[in-house]
Amino acid sequence: MGCTEVNPLVFDAARLRQANTIPERFVWPEHERPNNPSELDVPLIDLSGLRLGDAHTTFEAVKLVREACSRHGFFQVVNHWVESSLLKEAHEHMDRFFAMGLGEKQRAQRKPGESCGYASSFTGRFASKLPWKETLSFHFSPAMPHVVTDYFRSVLGDGFGSSGEVYQKYCDSMSEVSMNIMELLGLSLGVDRAHFRDFFMENDSIMRLNYYPPCQQPGLVLGTGPHCDPTSLTILHQDDVSGLQVFVDDQWHSIKPNPHAFVINIGDTFMALSNGRYKSCLHRAVVNSREPRKTLAFFLSPKMERVVRPPQDLVDQEHPRLYPDFTWATLLEFTQKHYRADMKTLDSFTRWLQTH
Ligand SMILES: C=C1C[C@]23C[C@H]1CC[C@H]2[C@]1(C)CCC[C@@](C)(C(=O)O)[C@H]1[C@@H]3C(=O)O
Ligand SMILES: O=C(O)CCC(=O)C(=O)O
Ligand SMILES: [Fe+2]
């Protein structure tokens, strides 16, 4: 397969769509390329029906969470309190942003070492295996109630104030959903129900809009390569185009899109917080040749300087400490300046901490 070399600094999916070959840097190694995996039925919890004080509804949810997280680290929730109009607006504003020309999007260009901004191929961060996607990432913290609105206005101009309002509301909503899930995770691990909820009540999270353009040779590229999220908990909303895959029982499985549900996966930081009882979920995103795919990913993370340490109940003779104390600020810096997050980030980070 002939590959034309393009300068990824000007990677523009629209241009590459016209090109009749995929540039070398976007072609993934044979063993990591997409296949046609089976679909997986994912356990689903109705959070809106859950009264965490009510034993019966809670028991079923806790049982499902414990089974899912002990086995593979993901499950799905529906939450009717998240207005469908908000979801619709969040996708519409994503369409509006990514439909802009490259120059306009690059007004929000992500700077090396930073986790916020627009990126189309992470140029300068990786030598090869570039993801076939464009992303816009921004910070969220309940302690700064207008941080998202302010970001959109300051970076993209007053014309994007309405987008900022939509994503501010969306992130507020995801933060709320996270608190309910943290109570379930605490109960499922046999620790005090409020333990993880209180730990994340203040959080420094990342919201990411993922836009995966169609690719003429989808079998050669990946939208997002195999990885575990270094964050604590990911709340992912897929549109109606499949592409999310999880690695379970030594095989990739596709997660069927359910536009009414959110896919929840455990990240590295929560794996450390649970002292390894729950494993970070290995997943990736594939693309197709027909239509773009879009996802909204809310990455819950603790306050930057909060020390990540499992509760004493989860450390005993049979379960010694698996990971050292660290802060999210240090792990985030590691993934932004020293190491591309993959399926071994936490082990690599632990070794890095010993010499830094
Ligand atoms: C803290 C983060 C780093 C990444 C965005 C959030 C959580 C997921 C991480 C990421 C998506 C994992 C795959 C590799 C990565 C480089 C990417 O494809 O975007 C990661 C993100 C990042 O470092 O920007
Ligand atoms: O878009 C998807 O389906 C997955 C994205 C993802 O895993 C990520 O952004 O970390
Ligand atoms: Fe991910």
Image (cartoon, helix red, strand yellow):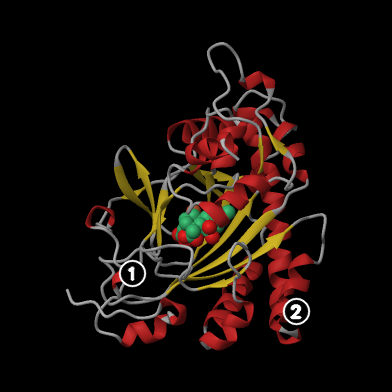
Q: How many residues crowd around disc 2 within 10 Å: few (fewer than 14), some, or many (20 or more)?
A: some
Q: Which numbered disc, 1 or 2, marks the residue that appears first in the sequence?
A: 1
Name, please, the residue furthest toward the front.
Answer: 355
- Residue 169 % position (x, y): 73, 65
Task: Please give the name of the residue rendered at 73% of the width and 84% of the height, measured from the top-left corner.
Answer: 157
Q: Which mark is residue 25?
A: 1
Confirm if mark 1 falls within 8 A of ligand 1. Answer: no
Q: Is residue 181 visible?
A: yes
Task: Please give the name of the residue rendered at 58% of the width and 22% of the height, measured from the top-left corner.
Answer: 321
Instruction: Determine whether the residue tagged by mark 1 lies in a helix, strand or loop.
Output: helix
Compared across the picture, whether 122 is left or right of 328 comes to left
Q: Is residue 236 visible?
A: no
Q: Is residue 289 above or below residue 351?
A: below
Q: Nearer the viewer, residue 166 or 156?
A: 156
Instruction: Determine whether the residue tagged by mark 2 lies in a helix, strand or loop.
Output: helix
Task: Please give the name of the residue rendered at 74% of the width and 47% of the height, measured from the top-left corner.
Answer: 303
Q: Nearer the viewer, residue 349 or 328?
A: 349
Q: Nearer the viewer, residue 255 or 113?
A: 113
The image quarter containing residue 140 is: bottom right
In the picture, the quarter occupied by the C terminus is top right
Measure the C-alpha gap from mark 1 to mark 2.
Answer: 34 Å
- Residue 353 % position (x, y): 58, 37
Compared across the picture, whether 64 is left or right of 204 comes to left
- Residue that mark 2 sits on: 153
Task: Please give the name of the residue rendered at 43% of the width and 79% of the height, measured from the top-left corner.
Answer: 11
